[in-house]
C-alpha cells in the first residue's frame, strides 16, 4: 500500500471521527433547542394569557376611570353651582351686614339718648321718691296730730254733753221751785228736790295712744307678721301703732295684734320697704 493511500486512509478516519463528533453534537443540541423552544412557547402562551388578563383589567380600570371622571365632572359642576350660589349669598349677607351695621350705629345714638333719658327719669324718680317719703312722714305726723285732735275733740264733746245735762237739770229744778212757790203762796216748805233728769256721771274719754314713747327692735320678720322686742311689761297694748325706721328712713307702720310680756307682734301697713331684723320701732317718730 502506498504512502498516499495510507495518508488518505488516515485522513478518512479522522474525518469520520470528526463527523461522528459533529453528529453527536448536533443531536445533543437539537434536543436542547427543542426543549428551549417548548419552554419559550409556553412562556409566550402564558405571556399572551397574562397580557389578555392585563388588557381586560386595564379596560375595566379604564371604564371605572371614565365613570369616576364623569362623576367627578358632575360633582365639580355641582360644586361650581353651589359655589356660585354661596358667593351670591355671601354678597347678600355682606349687604345685610352693612345695613345692620348702619342700623346698629344709628341705634347706638338712640340708645345713648335713651340712657340719658333713663338717667334723667331715674333722677326725677329718686326726687319724687324722696318727696313721697317726706309726704308719707308728714302724713304720719298729721295723722298722729289728727288722732290727738280727735281725742281732744271727743273730750270736749263729752264735757259739752255734761254741761248740757247739768243745764237741763238746773232748768228742771227752777221749774219745780216756781211751781212750789205758786202753790204755797210764798211759804216755802223745804223738801228734797228730785230732778226728772238724773245727774250723769262725768264721762271719761277713751285713751287713743299713749303719750310716752316706747322703743324696741325688730326681732323676727315673717310673711305677714313682724315681731318686736317690747311687750306688755313695757306698756305695749293691742292696736298700738309702731313706726319702723332704719336710720332716718321710714320703712312702714306696725299695728299690734298680739301682746306678750316681753314681746309683741302685728301686721304691717303703709309699707315703703320690708323691715329687717335689727330695725328700730317706736310709737313716736
Image (tube, grey):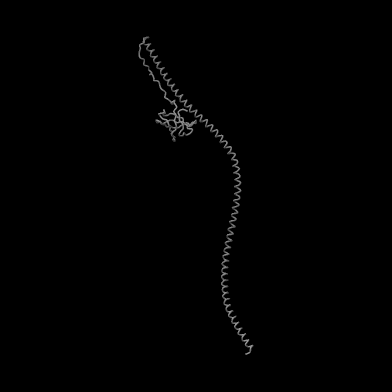
Q: Is residue 83 above or below residue 269?
A: below
User: Extreme front residue here?
Assistant: 3
Q: Nearer the viewer, residue 231 or 98?
A: 231
Q: Position of residue 132 (x, y in %)?
A: 51, 30
Q: How many marks?
A: 0
Q: Position of residue 121 (x, y in %)?
A: 55, 34
Q: Is residue 127 above or below residue 57?
A: above
Q: Is residue 89 above or below residue 61?
A: above
User: Extreme bottom residue here?
Assistant: 1
User: Extreme top residue here?
Assistant: 186
Q: Quadrant of residue 106?
A: top right
Q: Position of residue 37 (x, y in %)?
A: 58, 74
Q: Position of residue 140 (x, y in %)?
A: 48, 28
Q: Is residue 162 left or right of residue 38?
A: left
Q: Nearer the viewer, residue 186 or 230?
A: 230
Q: Nearer the viewer, residue 24 or 140?
A: 24
Q: Quadrant of the N terminus?
A: bottom right
Amino acid at each position: 500500500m502506498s504512502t498516499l493511500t495510507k495518508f488518505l486512509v488516515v485522513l478518512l478516519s479522522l474525518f469520520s471521527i470528526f463527523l461522528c463528533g459533529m453528529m453527536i453534537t448536533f443531536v445533543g443540541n437539537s434536543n436542547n433547542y427543542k426543549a428551549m423552544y417548548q419552554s419559550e412557547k409556553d412562556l409566550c402562551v402564558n405571556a399572551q394569557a397574562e397580557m389578555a388578563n392585563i388588557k381586560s383589567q386595564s379596560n375595566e380600570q379604564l371604564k371605572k376611570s371614565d365613570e369616576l371622571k364623569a362623576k367627578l365632572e358632575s360633582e365639580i359642576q355641582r360644586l361650581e353651582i353651589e359655589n356660585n350660589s354661596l358667593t351670591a349669598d355671601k354678597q347678600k349677607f355682606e349687604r345685610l351686614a352693612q345695613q345692620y351695621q348702619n342700623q346698629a350705629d344709628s341705634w347706638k345714638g338712640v340708645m345713648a339718648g335713651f340712657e340719658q333719658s333713663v338717667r334723667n327719669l331715674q333722677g326725677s324718680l329718686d326726687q319724687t321718691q324722696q318727696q313721697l317719703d317726706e309726704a308719707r312722714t308728714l302724713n304720719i305726723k298729721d295723722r298722729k296730730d289728727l288722732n290727738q285732735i280727735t281725742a281732744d275733740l271727743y273730750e270736749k264733746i263729752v264735757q259739752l254733753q255734761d254741761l248740757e245735762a247739768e243745764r237741763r237739770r238746773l232748768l228742771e229744778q227752777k221749774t219745780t221751785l216756781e211751781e212750789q212757790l205758786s202753790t204755797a203762796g210764798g211759804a216755802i216748805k223745804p223738801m228734797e228736790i228730785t230732778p226728772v233728769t238724773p245727774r250723769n256721771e262725768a264721762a271719761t274719754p277713751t285713751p287713743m295712744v299713749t303719750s310716752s314713747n316706747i322703743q324696741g327692735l325688730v326681732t323676727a320678720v315673717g310673711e305677714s307678721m313682724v315681731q318686736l322686742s317690747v311687750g306688755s311689761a313695757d306698756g305695749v297694748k293691742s292696736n298700738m301703732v309702731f313706726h319702723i325706721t332704719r336710720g332716718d328712713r321710714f320703712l312702714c307702720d306696725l299695728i299690734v295684734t298680739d301682746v306678750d310680756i316681753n314681746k309683741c307682734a302685728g301686721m304691717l301697713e303703709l309699707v315703703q320697704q320690708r323691715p329687717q331684723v335689727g330695725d328700730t320701732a317706736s310709737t313716736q317718730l
